Image (cartoon, rainbow, N blue to C red):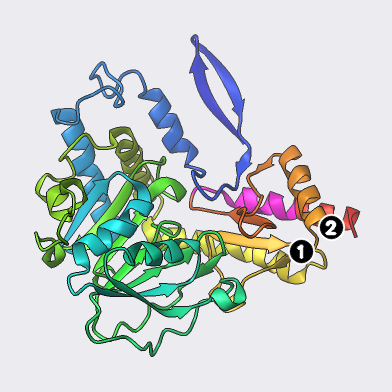
Amino acid sequence: MFVRVCQNQEEVKVSRIYNFSAGPAVLPEEVLQEAADEMLDYKGSGMSVMEMSHRSKVYDTIIKEAEADLRTLMGIPDNYKVLFLQGGASQQFAMIPMNLMRNRKAAYIVTGEWSRKAYEEAQIYGEAIAVASSADENYSYIPDCSDLDLPADVDYLYICENNTIYGTKFKELPNTKGHRLVADVSSCFLSEPVDISKYDVIYGGVQKNIGPAGVVIVIIKEELVSDQCLPGTPTMLKYQTHVKAESLYNTPPSYGIYICGKVFKWLLKNGGLSAMKALNEKKAAILYKFLDESKLFRGTVRPADRSLMNIPFVTGSAEMDDKFVKAAKAAGFENLKGHRSVGGMRASIYNAMPIAGVEKLVEFMGEFEKNNS
């Protein structure tokens, strides 16, 4: 892949590898080029967005357009608030119980590293109950959540909808039995249409599918925003603080939000979330088909629960896995090494990964298999 950039009035070509990183991850080249063109002078302001005040009229337009475009993309109802915050998804592990655990009791479905961490964090603030888990099979599946044993007095039910490390995805939301649903969607954010009305809080770090690291987007039902937080909750960790200030209580991660806004416009221009889902299904099908037919490589997730975004696979030999990762890197396929906690390989094929990247990866895997049978 190549992008064109200008340097000293001369056009130069910059080589672009296929980046399969789980996050920070690949972004649309069109967005990166636009940001490069505006780096020194954003729309005649004489400044980079990196330099301008978050209180300025220019930046106010940037953040308001970003929210409006996100609302359009996701069909966010008027009774939900949209927040652009700092701290990443991990800070939400504490903010959620601080703001929502009013009975000091919450239910968690533990399907991977991040839901486990959220569950453990919630135990600091009250009684966190693991009502389902797939730890027994190394998080390689999504448990049946159609009839969970949910105590009547839990404040909410929490899930991580797509598991970046293990490559699983909730294809159906759990039966909450009338309880509030909180979902971390960091690694499937904007990859497909969602019905926001089924969630009470939906949030995600943007560095996987939307923008640079440093921003987390929280979409929260307005009725949950109040001053009824746990005693001792810091001002900065109250949703009410940020709702009242329209995400500008303090200096926000302004450049990251600017890039998110560009990605929203890119998504709208390219058909929205229905088009992205179709594209993502096509990309994932190419790689899963190869894995299912391969005699060397195999996927690690139960087929019914496979993610469209993160696809882990192994050869069955740590030595062969290492050989493959090194050979792939040399061939221009970057960041295929699996998470340190599970090993093997993982291809993250977010919205901005072109079909050609997946096709070339499969072609390379086929050659590798032929040469290492």
User: From what the image shows, is residue 355 above or below residue 250?
Assistant: below
Mark 2: secondary structure: helix
Amino acid type for the residue under numbered disc 1: Phe
- Residue in the picture at 21% in, 54% down: 82
Residue matched to label 1 = 297
Q: Quadrant of residue 72?
A: bottom left
Between 333 and 42, the one nearer to me in the picture: 333
- Residue in the picture at 27% in, 46% down: 85
Proximity of marks 2 and 1: CB atoms separated by less than 8 Å: yes
Residue matched to label 2 = 369
Disc 2/disc 1 C-alpha distance (Å): 8 Å
Question: Quadrant of the image for the N terminus?
Answer: top right
Question: Which residue of the protein is positioned furthest toward the top in this rendering?
Answer: 8
- What range is drawn magenta here? 352-363
Q: Is residue 207 visible?
A: yes
Residue 55 pos. (x, y %) = 14, 30
Q: Is residue 362 magenta?
A: yes
- Residue in the picture at 60% in, 48% down: 20
Question: Quadrant of the image for the C terminus?
Answer: bottom right
Residue 86 pos. (x, y %) = 30, 44
Residue 48, disc: none
Residue 323 pos. (x, y %) = 80, 48
| Earlier residue among tags 2 and 1 | 1
Q: Is residue 283 visible?
A: no
Residue 226 pos. (x, y %) = 10, 61
User: From what the image shows, is residue 145 above or below residue 76?
Assistant: below
> 10 Å neighbourhood of mark 1: few (<14), some, or many (≥20)?
many
On the rendered structure, is 295 left or right of 22?
right
On the rendered structure, is 194 left or right of 346?
left
Amino acid type for the residue under numbered disc 2: Glu
